[in-house]
Amino acid sequence: MQTLYFKFTAAEESVYIFQTLGIEPFGRIGSGIVELIASILILNPRTTLLGALLGLGAMLGAIFSHIFVLGIEVQNDGGTLFVLAVITLLCCLILVYTARNKIPELMRFKI
């Protein structure tokens, strides 16, 4: 949730990142929406697993973007954004692990 402010207000660093990736502004706003939904889902105990899985996917995308396109350090940030993405990924992995008993229930979900 920390980076949502920067994504939704078109902060210089966010715009630079998504321009470099070639998906500005839709990628910036879209990823912000995905991260917001993941955060809300994580906060509700019934949907924590879904939120953690969504967050896991979002952070994998961020980490791969850093490794293959952006570089670990973006605009002299000392790698802060990369480290935050890794920490968030680890937190999502912990949440998935702790909610692993709900995975069969999630697989049986019917609309």
Image (cartoon, helix red, strand yellow):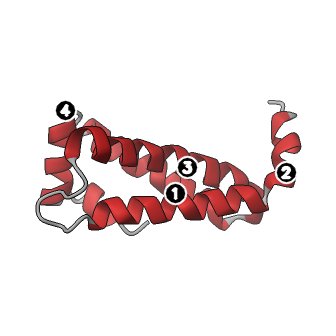
Q: Residue at x 28, y 38 (%)?
A: 68
Quadrant containing the N terminus is bottom left
User: Which is nearer the N-term, disc 4 or disc 1?
Assistant: 4
Which three-letter amino acid code belongs to the residue tagged 2? Lys
Which three-letter amino acid code belongs to the residue tagged 1? Leu
User: Which is nearer the N-term, disc 3 or disc 2?
Assistant: 3
Label 3, on which residue?
A: 56
Label 2, on which residue?
A: 102
Dividing the picture into quarters, in which one does residue 25 lie? top left
Which three-letter amino acid code belongs to the residue tagged 3? Leu
Residues packed near mark 4 inside 10 Å, few (<14), some (14 to 19) or many (20 plus): few
Viewer-nearest residue: 84 or 6: 84
Q: Compared to 102, does 75 lie above or below?
A: below
Residues packed near mark 1 inside 10 Å, few (<14), some (14 to 19) or many (20 plus): many
Label 1, on which residue?
A: 89
User: Which is nearer the N-term, disc 4 or disc 3?
Assistant: 4
Q: Residue at x 12, y 64 (%)?
A: 76
Q: Residue at x 11, y 59 (%)?
A: 75
Residues packed near mark 3 inside 10 Å, few (<14), some (14 to 19) or many (20 plus): many
As helix, strand or loop, the secondary structure at mark 3 comes to helix
Q: Are marks 4 and 3 in contact (CB under 8 Å)?
A: no
Q: CA distance from mark 1 to mark 3?
A: 6 Å
Q: CA distance from mark 4 to mark 1?
A: 24 Å
Q: Position of residue 6 (x, y in %)?
A: 26, 62
